[in-house]
Image (cartoon, rainbow, N blue to C red):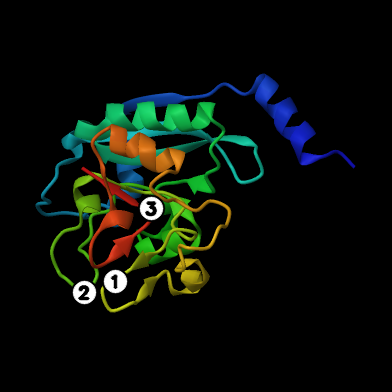
Amino acid sequence: MVGLAFIGALLLSTFQPVFTAEKIPPRVEARMRGSSYPEEGTAAVSLDELRYLRLSYYDFNGVPQTGEMVCNAAIAQDLLEIFEALFEARYPIRSIRLVDDFGGSDDASMLADNTSCFNYRVVPGQGHLSRHALGLAVDVNPFENPYIDARGVVRPPEAAEYVDRTRDFPHKIDREDLCCRLFRSHGFIWGGGWARSRDYQHFQK
């Protein structure tokens, strides 16, 4: 049987990494409308302020892939540099897909362990716009790095086994993790260091 390492090496020999940013193409806008972006009306961020990124990464099997992300233009260059460094280090990421692939549902995207950025939504239970709604926050490998609110509620709830951060397990983000260090070096705040709620997947500017 051919091993995954051999398959990964074979794919890498022909794989062309991609790290690009552009204005939102019409085909992507069509996917976003009524999902991650309002169908109509006024939003706090315009489509002109957003960028469509293509980012290469290594999946959990060590196989190179290229995913999609929408972010604010203000952090587009930061994300290109961060994800290129993660790719060069072969840092494992489950997937990088638009939240529109999950019907605009943050819960469904987290449950699928999907790394994403833009989603025009409010903070659950608080009513004000999330930093994700401005394209200024990124969630990385959210299933292994869940959000825990001040009451101890876990999102996604299926990720409760990853709440104990004293444990050592694969894909755990802590302060010394490469992903965390890269985001912080670019001026992002890590949600895992907040005083009350803890958001281990979350990096924002």
Look at the image and tell me in which quarter the N terminus lies. top right
The one of 181 and 126 positioned closer to us in this rendering: 181
Q: Residues within 10 Å of mark 1 (few under 14, many from 20)?
A: some
Look at the image and tell me in which quarter the C terminus lies. top left
Q: Under tag 2, what secondary structure?
A: loop
Quickly name the residue at label 3. Answer: 100
The one of 181 and 37 positioned closer to us in this rendering: 181
Do residues under tags 2 and 3 come within 8 Å of each other at their CB atoms?
no
Q: Which of marks 1 and 3 is in front?
A: 1
- The picture places residue 69, in percent across and down from the top left corner, at 38, 40
Q: Under tag 1, what secondary structure?
A: loop
Do residues under tags 1 and 2 come within 8 Å of each other at their CB atoms?
yes
Q: Is residue 113 above or below residue 79?
A: below
Picture quadrant of residue 178: top left
Residue at 23% across, 63% down? 195
Quickly name the residue at label 1. Answer: 149
